[in-house]
Amino acid sequence: MAVRGAEGQRESGWRFLLRALAHRNYRLFFMGQSVSLVGTWLTRVATSWLVYRLSGSAWLLGLVMFCGQIPSLVLAPLAGVLVDRWNRHRLLVVTQVLAMLQSFALAVLALTGAVEVWQVGGLCLVQGLINAFDVPARQSFVVEMVDDRADLPNAIALNSSMFNVARLLGPSVAGGLIAWVGEGGCFLIDGFSYLAVIASLLAMRLKRTPRVEPHGEVWKELKEGFRYAYHFTPIRALLGMLAVMSVMGMSYTVLMPLMATQVLEGGPSTLGFLMAATGLGALGGAGYLASRSSVRGFGKTIVRAGALFGAGLVAFAVSRWMAVSLVLLVVVGFGMMVMMAASNTLLQTIVEERMRGRVMSFYAMALIGTAPFGSLLAGALAARMGAPVTIGVGGVVCLGVAGWFGVKLPALRERVRPIYERLGIIPEVGPAKD
């Protein structure tokens, strides 16, 4: 396999898989974010373990996760309008500094022994407010770091790879660190890890582009964004599918402490291994997408990955053996990542540039903003029916929505085809695949 890369040369093998790193700004971001994301996963695992240790309540565990995710649902659409108006690079520097301070605050509370569940919930809410602006800004900023638009799908896939290497390393290390230095030590390490991504952002050399002055009131632009996303069927279908998958399927991570302790009869290390298995599968999924030279065929890929994700969750819910559960979570992670990253790539490909910030905020809202309801629902159901049944029900729903998207796929192809022709992804004559 060989394509023309950023330098206009034929590339193959591992150079092809890493072609987006030829862009200096993206390479800086990739290195800085790789360090920071490991710390982020340390905090995620440590937070869930801390809340469960302090409360012993599945309901409170779900409630704290709700606090960290609900701002993305409430504020993401407004944040998307502002991302389309503001300098995305400066906005990212601000959000990363604020996130660093939030991690240090968690560390101080945990290390001094003064931490309580309500404090953790409050600081998770603060992080959620930061993420409401950070996620759409980061997603939209990718196109500014990659000069050759042909390398955009690879950059998105590498972002997913970076995220999942961190998912693999972070939870694996977190299990041991929680036992060694406690949750507070994990929060402290996370705080310092933000320095890497802040430094990478400040070291970038960006082209100065004419600033587009706002052409309307914020609320009118917000309404315009909603209207655009709703009336363009492919975007509406992708966002709807992701929202259902998030609510019913991805909330399984909230119940991991229960699965580790009650079902598999383990401790912090067991939790770390379970999360790492998901990360390993997701890393494989991101690697698979990075090997793709085109977005053609991504529609079927999303359907298959969504079905694999749902089936893996059902099987994991039934398993009572550690080794089997680890294998199944590799499958779950692979399906989840391919579905999410392929959907992201399609959205970034077909969206109009002037709508990019708003559409990516809707993506964040569908994937992250709806998750609070999944967390609350998972916590409530698990308290009544148990974690395995809750995860199994979510898997069945995910299988159903993957089937629904598959039925809609032929009609969606016809809507996407003119965009692919304009971008040169497919020839103007001949059958199209999306």
Image (tube, helix red, strand yellow):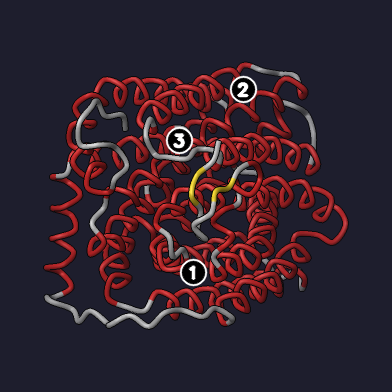
Residue 319: assigned label: none
Residue 339 is marked as 3
Nearer to the camera, 23 or 142: 23
When the figure is inspected, residue 146 is found, relative to residue 233, above or below; the finding is: below
Sequence-first disc among 3 and 2: 2
User: Which residue occupies the foreground of this view, 223 or 289?
Assistant: 289
Which mark is drawn over residue 126?
1
Eyeballing the image, is 41 above or below 254?
Answer: below
Badge 1 crowding class, 10 Å Cα cut-off, few under 14, some 14 to 19, many 20 or more, is some
Question: Does dot 3 land on a helix, a strand or a loop?
Answer: helix
Q: Are marks 2 and 1 in contact (CB under 8 Å)?
A: no
Q: CA distance from mark 2 to mark 1?
A: 33 Å
What residue appears at the point 17 percent right and 46 percent down from the top-left corner? 230
Q: Is residue 427 left or right of residue 47?
A: left
Helix, strand or loop at label 2? It is helix
Q: Which residue shows up at 51% across the image and 19% down it?
A: 311
The three-letter amino acid code for the residue at tag 3 is Met
Residue type for callout 2 = Phe
**Residue 249 shown left or right of residue 50 in the figure:** left
Depth-wise, is mark 1 or mark 3 nearer the camera?
3
Label number found at residue 316: 2
